[in-house]
Image: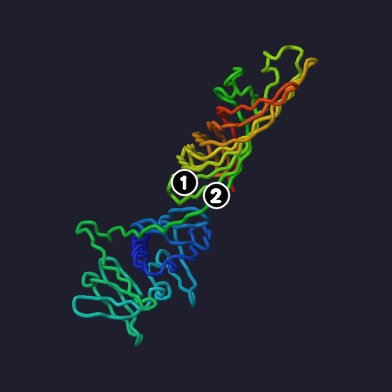
Amino acid sequence: MRRYSALRLALFLAWLPAVSSGQQRGWTLGIRNGDDLADVELVSVQSDSLTIYYAGTIQQLTLNAIARMSRSEGGSHVVRGAAVGLLFGGGIGLVAGELIDTKNRSSKGSIVEIVPDSVVRLRTPDGNVQVMNMSDVGRITKEVGGQVASQTQPSVPADSGMPAAIERAPAVHRKSIFGVDAGLALPSGDFGSTDQVRGGLVQTGYFVGVHLMSVQDQVPVAWYTSIMLSRNRIEAPGFPSLGPDVAVDAGSYTCLWFMTGVHVVGELSPTSGIYGVGQVGEVFGWSPAINASSALGYARLKPANGSAFAFGVGGGLVINDRYTIGCKFIHGEPEYSMSIVGSALTVFVKGKQSTSILQISAGMNF
C-alpha cells in the first residue's frame, strides 16, 4: 500500500509546473522518523525517490519515507499522499486552475486526486467533481501569471503496471567558497642551490595564502583563484668564496603569487576526498638586501623587484569539505635589476632568478 501511495506522490511531484521555479522552493517535509525538514527545494523525482536541495546539500529520499509535505503560498497547502493514500485538494492546490484535455473535451479546475492507471478527479469552479479516465487524459496545462505550462500524460510501459519515471531538470546552485592556507615553502631546483652563479642560496621558508572557489552542486570541477605570500631567507654560509673573514648579513626573497585555474575533487568516502589543482598567473618578487664587510672594505647588494609568468600544480586531501592537507609546486623566474655598492665602486647587474617552491600546506574552507 505504501508503494502504491508513493507512486501517486511521484505523479503529483512530476506535475508541478516548470514555469515558476519558486513553486519548487519553501517546502517542509515531514519524515516518518519524526524529523521535519524546513525550507526544502524540490529538484527532481523518480518513480520511487525524491531529490531535494536542503541545508546547502543535495539529498535523496525514498517516497515511502515521506509522511507529509506542506508549503504555504497564500494559504496552507498540504500533501499527505503517502500517509493516507490520497492527494487531497489542499495539497494539490498549488497547481489549481489546470486545464485537462481529454479525447472529448477540456475541463478546468483543481486536481483532487490522481490514481495511476485509473482515474483523475477534478474539482470544477462550481464545486462539482469530475472523474476522468487516465487513459483519456492527453495533456494537463496550467496558467500562471498569464503563461501556460504544459505537462503531457507520461507514457506507461504496457507491462510495468506503474508510471514511467519523470525527472525534472535539476536546479543549478552555485556558491563561492573562501579559504585560507599556510605552511612550509621548500626551495627547489636552482632556488635552493648554493651554486654561486645560478643558485638562490635560500633556506626553507613559509607561506600564507587565501583562495576563492566558484563551485556548482554535483560538479567536481571548480574555478580556483589564490593569492600567496612566500618568504625564504638567504643562507649566509652560502657565500664561501667571500672568505672566512667576511661577515655577511642577508635578508629574504619575498614573493607574491597571483594565480588562477581549476580545482578538481574526487570522493574517497562520505567525509573525505582527494583534490588536484592547476593554475597559471604572475609572480612579483623582491630580492634580499645583502651586506658583506671585512677589514678590507664592504659591499652592499641593494634589494630590487621583478615579476614573471608563473604556474603551479598540486593536490591533497579534503576532510568534511572543510579541512585540507596538500602540497603544490609553484615556479616563476622574476628578473631583477640590482646594484652593488662597494667601498671602491658601484656595479649594476640584471638577471633572472629561478624561483621554484614546493608548498606543504594545511588549510580551511569557510
Q: Is residue 323 above or below residue 170?
A: above
Q: Nearer the viewer, residue 28 or 143?
A: 143
The image shows residue 162 at horizontal and vertical percentages of: 27, 60
Q: Is residue 260 above or below residue 117?
A: above
Q: Nearer the viewer, residue 317 or 200?
A: 200
Residue density around tag 2, few if under 14, some if 14–19, many if 20 or more, within 10 Å = some
Amino acid type, residue under disc 1 in the picture:
Ala
Give the residue drawn at x 53%, y 45%.
225
| Residue 206 visible in the picture | no
The image shows residue 14 at horizontal and vertical percentages of: 34, 64
The single residue placed furthest to the top in the displayed view is 244
Give the residue drawn at x 46%, y 46%.
222
The single residue placed furthest to the bottom in the displayed view is 126
The image shows residue 131 at horizontal and vertical percentages of: 27, 77
| Left or right for 40, reference 98 | right
Amino acid type, residue under disc 2 in the picture:
Ile
Structural distance between the alpha carbons of marks 1 and 2 = 10 Å
Give the residue drawn at x 64%, y 27%.
348
The single residue placed furthest to the right in the displayed view is 295
Residue labelled with disc 1: 222
* Label annotation for residue 25: none
The image shows residue 337 at horizontal and vertical percentages of: 61, 31
Q: Secondary structure at mark 1?
A: strand
**Residue 360 image-quadrant placement:** top right
Q: Secondary structure at mark 2?
A: strand
**Residue 133 image-quadrant placement:** bottom left
Residue density around tag 1, few if under 14, some if 14–19, many if 20 or more, within 10 Å = some
Number of marks in the rendered image? 2
Residue labelled with disc 2: 177
Task: Decide which of tag 1 and tag 2 comes sooner along the chain.
Answer: 2
